[in-house]
Amino acid sequence: MNEIETFDVVVVGGGPAGATAAHELARKGRKVLLLDRAGRIKPCGGAIPPRLIRDYAIPESLLVARATAARMISPNEVKVDIPIEDGFVGMVDRDQFDEWLRNRAVSAGAVRRTGLFEKLERGADGVNVVHYRVRERNRPGEGTPARVCARTVIGADGAKSGVARQAVPGAENTRYVFAYHEIIAAPKERPPGYDAARCDVWYQGRLSPDFYGWVFPHGDTLSVGTGSADKGFSLRNAVGALREASGLADAQTLRREGAPLPMKPLRRWDNGRDVVLAGDAAGVVAPASGEGIYYAMLGGTLAADAVEGLLRTGDVRSLATARKRFMKAHGRVFWVLGIMQRFWYSSDRRRERFVSICKDKDVQQLTFESYMNKELVRKKPMAHVRIFFKDMAHLLGLARV
């Protein structure tokens, strides 16, 4: 395979997970190819917590808005406002944010190419050959075939990852929510109740039978979206209804985007030899909340560490450390959120009680502290005890809604 260019690592996918992995490995001196599919922007509310901003040195210029409050709206239109005390949630536009991450990887030494991944093939010498197609603007058709050799491969090519399906056993056994949003221009005349520093989350069955709808500020624009695993549910109609309910029906629509979101981490992230997954390809979108950017970037970092360990030592067991480290840090949170989504999002009656629970100051404080810092809050045991008994009262129907 000497006639084919060889890389230490080929990262397939240039979203937050792939771009982060490429950056981490390039700055360690590895020869990295970042293979990205052009022209695709994932539907995303664009919220990033302070922990991400700190850990990954995100410049303030990328923040198009700062959310200082969240509003939860129940099926009966009960509104619960939750202030974000002593902080904010950063809001980013994914087209700008992802491109900045890719450029940072290139500045660290990664080679960036635009192409559509096709397949992995094992060469005669046992090294992976990554096949892809390069699509050129001025040349219609399916593109020019290309290939490179890869000592290791990181699959960060999103939900329903081609790398995962070809290389990692069991990758096809994943449950998805399909997300759809519309980016609209912020109205010049603000509708009643509009707040450019507030994230609105709508828990109503008409907007999603098993997820939620959102209206998130992005400075001059807004992301209005919803999601569902129900294939017969019209997401586009639901977003239209959400825009109407929010007074945004007449706002200019700038673009529409949709994509599947995995709702559970895969049981295995590597092939035991030279491939490891990261981001949506590994299934690390938080259930119930749909949050993915922080977990994708952390997954990219852990995948990079695992690959570096393999390249340095030759020990293939290094690849499994990516999933082990992630689940040790966040597995319990994902488990709790999965249960919460299945229970509280199953009917409007339960959604009503869920929003009512969120009126509680203990719930608000512990939830946002955990979200902002990506750690379970353990320093307030009595608050947890109070929340437990309040939750039980709601579950048993003993609490007022």
Image: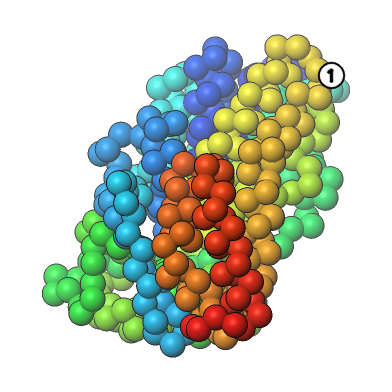
Q: Is residue 114 above or below residue 191?
A: above
Q: Position of residue 76 (x, y in %)?
A: 44, 87
User: Could you tell me which residue is drawn at 27 percent across and 52 percent down?
Assistant: 65
Q: Secondary structure at mark 1?
A: loop
Of residues 165 and 334, the one nearer the viewer is 334
Q: Is residue 31 above or below residue 302?
A: above
Q: Position of residue 11 (x, y in %)?
A: 60, 32
User: Could you tell me which residue is drawn at 50 percent across and 83 percent down?
Assistant: 400
Q: Amino acid at mark 1?
A: Asp
Going by the image, does 102 lie left or right of 134? left
Q: Which residue is mark 1?
A: 125
Going by the image, does 14 lie left or right of 61? right
Q: Position of residue 133 (x, y in %)?
A: 60, 41
Q: Is residue 288 above or below residue 101?
A: below
User: Could you tell me which residue is drawn at 48 percent across and 53 percent down?
Assistant: 366
Of residues 333 and 381, the one nearer the viewer is 381
Q: Position of residue 355 (x, y in %)?
A: 48, 74
Of residues 207 and 251, the one nearer the viewer is 207
Residue 248 found in image quarter = bottom left
Quarter of the image that includes the N terminus? top right
Q: Is residue 143 visible?
A: no
User: Could you tell me which residue is drawn at 66 percent across and 19 percent down?
Assistant: 308
Q: Is residue 377 above or below residue 224?
A: above
Q: Is residue 258 visible?
A: yes
Residue 129 found in image quarter = top right
